[in-house]
Every structure is written in C-alpha cells, then in structure tokens.
Image (tube, helix red, strand yellow):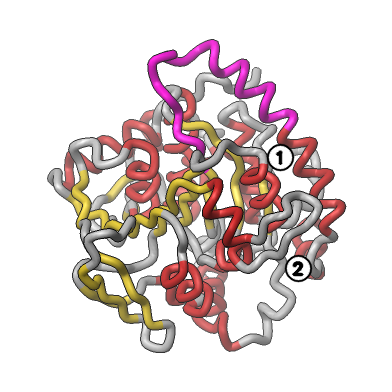
Amino acid sequence: MYGHRILRMQRIRISAALAAASAWMLLAASAHTAEAEHVNPTITPVSIILDTDMHTDCDDVGTLALLHALADMGEARILAVVHSAPAPWGPRCVEAVNRYYGRPEIPVGAISWPDYEESPVYDHYRGSHRYLARHDREYVERVGRTIADDPGDPPDAVALYRRVLAGAPDGSVTICAVGMLYAVAQLLDSPPDDISPLNGRELVSQKVRQLVTMGGGTFPEGADKFNWECDRASAGRVINDWPVGLAVSPHGEHVLTGARLAAETPEDNPVRMAYEIYLQGAGKSRSSWDQIAMLYAVRGTAGLFVQQTGHRITYDPATGRNQWLPDPESPQVCVDLEADVGAVRDAIEDLMVRAPENQPD
C-alpha cells in the first residue's frame, strides 16, 4: 500500500528525486504557459511554494483551494507543494486537490520521518493523530483514495525545494509555510549539490523574496501554536536565522470558513469532502489560520491586514515564547487583522468555493 511504503521510507535518494522533480517542472512550465492565455495580463502573479502539514486540520485543504483560485485568477503561480507532516497519505491528498483544480503537473514533495514513532520530539503531533483516528476525523486517506491511479512515491522535499529555487529568478519566490518548519530548516542546512553550487542559506538568500509562516509569533510577544510547538527545534532554526523577508501570521481562530462548501460546491469536491470528514458533517466551519497566511502571501495587506514593522522576532525553542524587538532595518513583519472578521471570512470563503477554471472533463 502507498501509506505503508512511505512509512518505511528513509530519505529518498537524491538522484531519483531530481529526476522526478525535473519531469514535473517541465510539465508545470507548459501548463503555466497555457494558463497565461486566460488571465489578466496586467497582473504579475506571485510565485508560491506552499509548505503544508495537511493532516491534523482541514484548513490546510482550504488553503490549497484558495491558492488554486488565486492561480485561476492570475494572481499566483504555484511552483510546488511540500508536505511536511508524518502522514503517509498527505501527499496523495494534495495530489487529489491539485487534480480537481486541473493542475496535476504541480510537483509534490515529502519528508521522510524515520524516527517519528519513537522520538519524544513528536509526542504532541502523535497525540493529535491519535485523537483524529479515535474520532474518525482523518480525511487524508479517504480523499487520497479518490485518485484511481497510484502517483508513486513523492520526491524528497528538500531536493524539490532546491530544484525549484535554483530554476527561479532571483528574489522571486514566496514560501508560505502553514505547517511544521522541518523541511524549511532542512533546506537552510542543505549542502551544495548537483542542483546548485550554493548551500541552502545562500540559495534562499538569492532566490526567495519572503517566507510567510503561521504558527505563533504574536506581536509584541506571545507563545507558539501547534505548528511551531510540534517541532520547536526547526522553528527556532528558521525563525531566528532566516536571511530574507519574514512575515509571521498568528491569527485566524475567530475567522470561521468552510460552511459554504456544502451549498456551493459539488459532492466530489475533495475540499468539501475533507471539511465534512474532519468536521463530521456538512455546512460546518473551521478556523482559518492557514488561509490568512496564504491570502497575505499573495495579496499583501489588501485592505484586510496591517503589518507591524520596525521589529525583529526572537523565538526561544526551549519555552516556545517569542518577542519582537525594535529593529528599524528589519525585513520582518507581524501580520495582524485590520478589517472586521466578517470581511476577512468572506474574502477567504469566496475563493474557497470558486469553481475551478481548468477542471478536467
């Protein structure tokens, strides 16, 4: 079975990952050319890599739907999706959503987790996983099984990151990380290889415009949330040593979205399926932490958000606490809500229920 193979998987060989990523990138280039014929030529799309832990919450699926809608509107170009969670069916769930929106060519990378079952680092995540299983709220396998064929093992996430960044124009890529920061930390620490003579930090400095991360970071101080808390070592590595622009998005709990999926999208919509499985019923809503991060990553403040500037965040992995310290030269911001909750909700949900423009027959 697909799931059992990935659970047994150690780090995927870099050579195989590069071959798969290269093939996907060629397909993606032709698809993006076709898409460009149907969008507003005055819009410059934001080049996005989504890093998601699609598994323990349904807002990750809502975020991917929102991103596809923005791509349909010409506002975003989806370069890749990285799955950063120890959920073997997660990458295939991502594939199902990508196919529904007519973009099967988008490369999906994954991390191997050889010590997941034993390491105390992942106690918190394992507890959340057990809760989902006990209450029959796991959606990734059921959504992933809607794909009739087996897409095979996904390429290594870090190799995919390096391949996509190496092929991008300088300073052009936005990474939106709405899960644990394990893969991003591994990217920073990656050595030069056949893809690029640059190490990870150098590659990020040259190619990435900004990282948008959701997982805590409240201004002016606060405590981490699930994403950073589940892997504090990786969060500390990234938050405290990110070399380019960094936007931290801590909000979304009270922005409830998803209820409109049941009334405004078809039953075979994998996003609707995920929400109804996770929330155990139709017409229910869930907090929108991840969607807010992605909406900001593509549209910026857009009359909905405000940036806290002139400060730099410090994060203590030992305690999970953060502080924003004055720094007028800092390229870092904290993203707060400016519009009322209803306006943010409507902006997100309008995109989540938008019909795909490139859906296959």
* The one of 346 and 112 positioned closer to us in this rendering: 112
Q: Residue at x 80, y 44 (%)?
A: 20
Residue 70 in the image: x percent, y percent? 43, 30
Q: Residue at x 54, y 83 (%)?
A: 123
Question: From what the image shows, is residue 344 above or below residue 310?
Answer: above
Neighbor class of circle 2 (other Cα within 10 Å; few <14, some 14-19, many 20+) is some
Residue holding disc 2: 7
**In this rendering, would 58 be left or right of 189?**
left
46 part of magenta stretch: yes
* The one of 206 and 23 positioned closer to us in this rendering: 206
Sequence-wise, which precedes: disc 1 or disc 2? 2
* The one of 97 and 103 positioned closer to us in this rendering: 103
Q: In terms of secondary structure, where does tag 2 sit? A: helix
Q: Is residue 288 visible?
A: yes
Q: Residue at x 46, y 61 (%)?
A: 243
| The image quarter in which residue 35 lies | top right
Question: What is the quadrant of the N terminus in the image?
Answer: bottom right
**In this rendering, would 110 be left or right of 281?**
right
Which residue range is magenta in the image? 26-48
Q: Is residue 276 visible?
A: no
**In this rendering, would 297 be left or right of 110?**
left
Residue 357 in the image: x percent, y percent? 51, 19
Residue holding disc 1: 147
Question: What is the quadrant of the C terminus in the image?
Answer: top right
Question: From what the image shows, is residue 326 above or below residue 137?
Answer: below
